[in-house]
């Protein structure tokens, strides 16, 4: 059984390849792909097949997916307007290659999400359904790392800044979400399933600030801004305007509960409680 992991040059993709190896999948049965395979040369050195796959280049996808049985489509990290077309090219190439299952990393509540990002996931899910492609939807919640990666700035400024109001977030670590992907790629009975994946312990951004403050031993506030002001603040620190607007819009989705789930799907798939915010911070001590 050959398993293709797209985006293996990225963090989630690489973690999924490592999870597959831990689960006993022979390296030769894993095809790790990316736009620049120089970034996964070390995986090739360990026996994993490394192939170039550019979502914008249909020919590269045909070559990358040859002989594959199952495929993990990690949603594209490209401008929002290009995402759905890229995903469709991947899915078309997977069908042409005879792939028996496509696992797609979507977002929580993609069928009802109103955010800019959520809409692209919803369109991709619809394409999977319309083409009757055997698939499993991994509706990944927000990454814990989205927040822990900001710790230097948060600690320096003494504040978490956002526009999520009192919305609760069921964040999970990339490693746990990668483990869940590896499970569905290596076990049976997942075709047609929709998994809402998030941590067991949700939090608001105000609670995030308080938890970081407790771990760091200093007061951290939460500054809740209007969406437009939050977008301007993100742009002011150097983010491209479009990305700043997309991220601010995502916080608006958080305020509406679009990144909250109490499904327990992640815990059941990986067979243990997911890493919590407190545990993730403890692993980074001293802050």
Image (cartoon, helix red, strand yellow):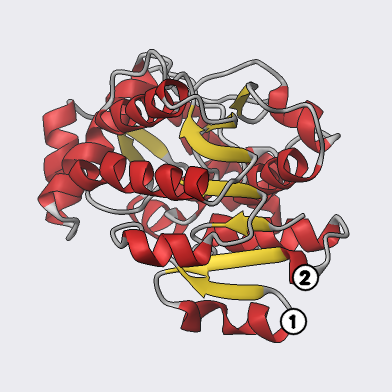
Quadrant of the rendered image containing residue 223: top left
Residue located at (43% from left, 66% from top)? 53
Q: Left or right? Give the position of 263 relative to 24.
A: left
**Rendered-image quadrant of the N terminus:** bottom right
Q: Is residue 147 visible?
A: no
Query: How many marks overall?
Result: 2
Residue located at (73% from left, 38% from top)? 184
Quadrant of the rendered image containing residue 131: top left
Whole-angstrom CA distance, mark 1 to mark 2, is: 7 Å
Residue 119 percent location from the top left of the image: 29, 26
Residue 38 against residue 11 in the figure, above or below: below
Q: Secondary structure at mark 1?
A: loop
Residue located at (47% from left, 33% from top)? 106
Circle 1/circle 2 CB separation < 8 Å: yes
Which of these two is toward me, 149 or 184? 184
Q: Point out which mark residue 46 bears.
A: 1
Which of these two is toward me, 103 or 254? 103
Give neighbour class at mark 2: few <14, some 14-19, many 20+ (Cα, 10 Å).
many
Q: Point out which mark residue 160 bears.
A: none
Residue 210 percent location from the top left of the image: 52, 34
In the picture of the structure, the residue carrying the numbered disc 2 is: 27
Residue 147 against residue 230 in the figure, above or below: below
Quadrant of the rendered image containing residue 275: top right
Residue 229 percent location from the top left of the image: 13, 34
Residue 221 percent location from the top left of the image: 39, 36
**Rendered-image quadrant of the C terminus:** bottom right
Question: Disc 1 or 2, which lies upstream in sequence?
Answer: 2
Which of these two is toward me, 75 or 261? 75
């Amino acid at each position: 059984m050959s398993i293709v992991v797209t985006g293996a040059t990225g963090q989630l993709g690489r973690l999924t390849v490592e999870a597959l190896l831990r689960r006993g999948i022979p390296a030769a049965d894993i095809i790790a792909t990316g736009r620049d395979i120089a970034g996964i040369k070390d995986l090739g050195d360990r026996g994993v097949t490394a192939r170039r796959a550019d979502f914008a280049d249909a020919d590269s996808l045909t070559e990358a997916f040859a002989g594959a049985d199952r495929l993990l489509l990690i949603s594209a990290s490209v401008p929002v307007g290009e995402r759905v077309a890229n995903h469709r090219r991947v899915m078309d190439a997977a069908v042409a290659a005879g792939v028996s299952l496509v696992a797609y990393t979507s977002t929580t509540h993609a069928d009802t999400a109103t955010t800019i990002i959520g809409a692209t996931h919803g369109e991709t899910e619809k394409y999977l359904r319309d083409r009757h492609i055997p698939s499993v939807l991994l509706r990944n919640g927000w990454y814990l790392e989205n927040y822990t990666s900001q710790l230097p700035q948060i600690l320096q400024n003494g504040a978490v800044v956002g526009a999520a109001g009192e919305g609760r977030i069921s964040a999970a670590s990339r490693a746990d979400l990668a483990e869940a992907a590896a499970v569905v790629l290596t076990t049976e009975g997942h075709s047609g399933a929709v998994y809402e994946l998030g941590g067991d312990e949700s939090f608001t951004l105000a609670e995030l600030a308080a938890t970081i403050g407790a771990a760091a031993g200093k007061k951290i506030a939460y500054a809740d801004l209007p969406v437009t002001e939050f977008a301007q603040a993100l742009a002011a620190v150097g983010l491209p305007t479009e990305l700043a607007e997309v991220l601010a819009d995502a916080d608006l989705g958080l305020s509406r509960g679009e990144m909250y789930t109490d499904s327990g799907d992640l815990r059941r798939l990986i067979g243990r409680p997911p890493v919590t915010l407190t545990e993730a911070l403890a692993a980074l001590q001293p802050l």
